[in-house]
Image: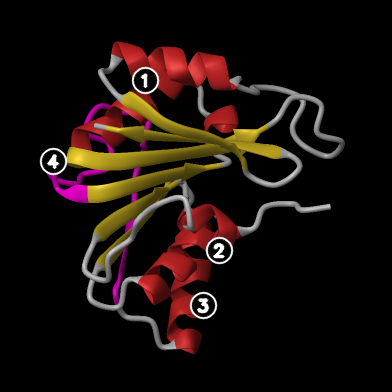
Amino acid sequence: MDFLNVTQVLNYIDLKKNMSVAEFGCGSADFTIALAKKLPMGRVYALDIQEEKLSALEGKLAVQGIDNVSMILCDLEAPKGSTIKDDSLDVVFIPNVLFQAENKHGMIEEAKRVIKSGGQLLIIDWLAGAPFGPKDGLVTPDEIKGIAKKLGLSLKKEFAAGDYHYGLLFVK
C-alpha cells in the first residue's frame, strides 16, 4: 500500500537546482521541505490560508536549517491571491488541496498566472472511493482537465500518485 510518496511524485518533474517553485496550500509542507532540499540554489514558496500551518512550517525549517523557503499567508482562490508576480515561477504544486477549495477554477487560474511560459503545474488529489479520504468536494481528473483546457494549459502527463491519489502534470 503506497499512500503518497513525495519523492516519487517529484520525479515526474525535471527539477533544476535553481528553480523557483510554490506549494499552494502547503499544509504539513511535505512537498515544500522536499523541494527546498532538492533546489538548494532555488526558492520555494509555501502558501497557505491557515497561519498555524505556516507557523509549524517555520519551526520545521529552523530545525532542519533550511533557508530557501518563503512563507505567504494568503487566499489562493482570490484573484492574485498568492501575491506572487505574474509569470515568475517554474513550477506550482497543488497537492491534496482542490477537494477543499470552493473556487477550484480560481485556484488553478492563480497557479497559471504565476507560472512562466513553459512552466509546469502539478495537481495531486484524492481518488474517489479512497477508504479514508474525503467524502465531500472531490474533484475528478476529468473536471481538472476541463478547467485546465479552458485556461489554455496542456496536459503533459497523468499518473497514479500512490494508491489513493492521482496526479496531473500540465504545461503553460
Tell me: residue 103, above or below residue 36. above
**Which image quadrant: the C terminus?**
top left
Is residue 75 on the magenta stretch?
A: yes
Instruction: Note whether residue 72 is visible.
Output: yes
Task: Read off the magenta span.
Answer: 68-89
Label at residue 7: 2
- Answer with the quarter of the image where residue 109 lies: top left
Snapshot colouring: secondary structure
Distance between the alpha carbons at the discs numbered 1 and 3: 33 Å
Q: What residue is pinned by disc 1?
A: 148
Label at residue 60: 3
Q: Look at label 2 and name its amino acid.
A: Thr
- Please give the name of the residue rendered at 60% of the width and 35% of the height, measured from the top-left corner: 125
Locate residue 107 relative to residue 118 in the image: left or right.
right
Label at residue 115: none
- Please give the name of the residue rendered at 24% of the width and 69% of the height, measured from the top-left corner: 42
Instruction: Note whether residue 29 is visible.
Output: no
Q: Look at label 4 and name its amino acid.
A: Asp
Give how far across and how far down residue 127 sits, in percent: 70, 30
- Regarding mark 1 in the picture, which secondary structure is present there? helix
